[in-house]
Image (spheres, rainbow, N blue to C red):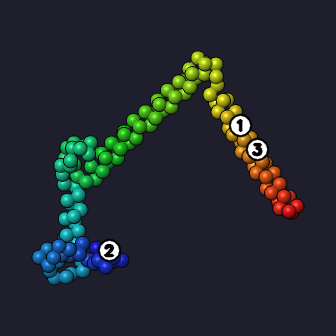
Amino acid sequence: MDPDAGGDPTLLRDGGANGAGYIANVGGGASFAELLIAYGDRLDQPTTFDPQAGITGSFGVAAYANNAIGWFEGVRQQAASAAEAKEALAMRTAEALSNATGVNVDQELSLLLDLEHTYQASARILNSVNQMLDALMAAVR
């Protein structure tokens, strides 16, 4: 149907996308709209959808879309609540560990990062000194 992909949008209005036997606008009239109106009417007719989608019953496409959006919002809220509960549990666990051991995990991780950065800086200094000594030995030879 997409003209940019080589399709013909009049097939929606006239029919014939599935072959010549399916043409509804046999006269080719430009004001033919019965097929488009029938498409719109079918969107409102109740249809039974797969129950695995989480919505049971027969709905039109628009009502099904509204129910699906509501269902997705409910699932999102459940996931957000579960994430908040896990975050609170992690915070309580870290606090209980800190209280039981007398060690503040956040402070220890901060000190560990400082130690790592100091080690990296020392390694760079030793590398620079090594390069200078190599250059000096090469100049003396």
Q: Is residue 110 left or right of residue 19?
A: right
**Residue at numbered disc 2:** 2
| Three-letter code for the amino acid on which mark 3 is drawn | Ser
- Rounded to the nearest angstrom, the CA distance separating label 1 from label 2 is 62 Å
Q: Quadrant of the C terminus?
A: bottom right
Task: Say which element carries label 1.
Answer: helix
Task: Say which element carries label 2.
Answer: loop
Q: Position of residue 65 (x, y in %)?
A: 30, 51
**Residue at numbered disc 3:** 122
Extreme right residue here? 140
- When the figure is inspected, residue 22 is found, relative to residue 116, above or below; the finding is below
Q: Position of residue 25 (x, y in %)?
A: 17, 77
- When the figure is inspected, residue 127 is found, relative to residue 110, above or below; the finding is below
| Three-letter code for the amino acid on which mark 1 is drawn | Leu
Whether residue 78 is visible to the viewer of this picture, yes or no, is: yes
Q: Quadrant of the N terminus?
A: bottom left
Q: Position of residue 66 (x, y in %)?
A: 32, 48
Whether residue 23 is visible to the viewer of this picture, yes or no, is: no
**Residue at numbered disc 1:** 115
- Camera-side mark, 3 or 2: 3
For the point 43% across and 33% down, which residue is it? 82
Q: Quadrant of residue 114?
A: top right
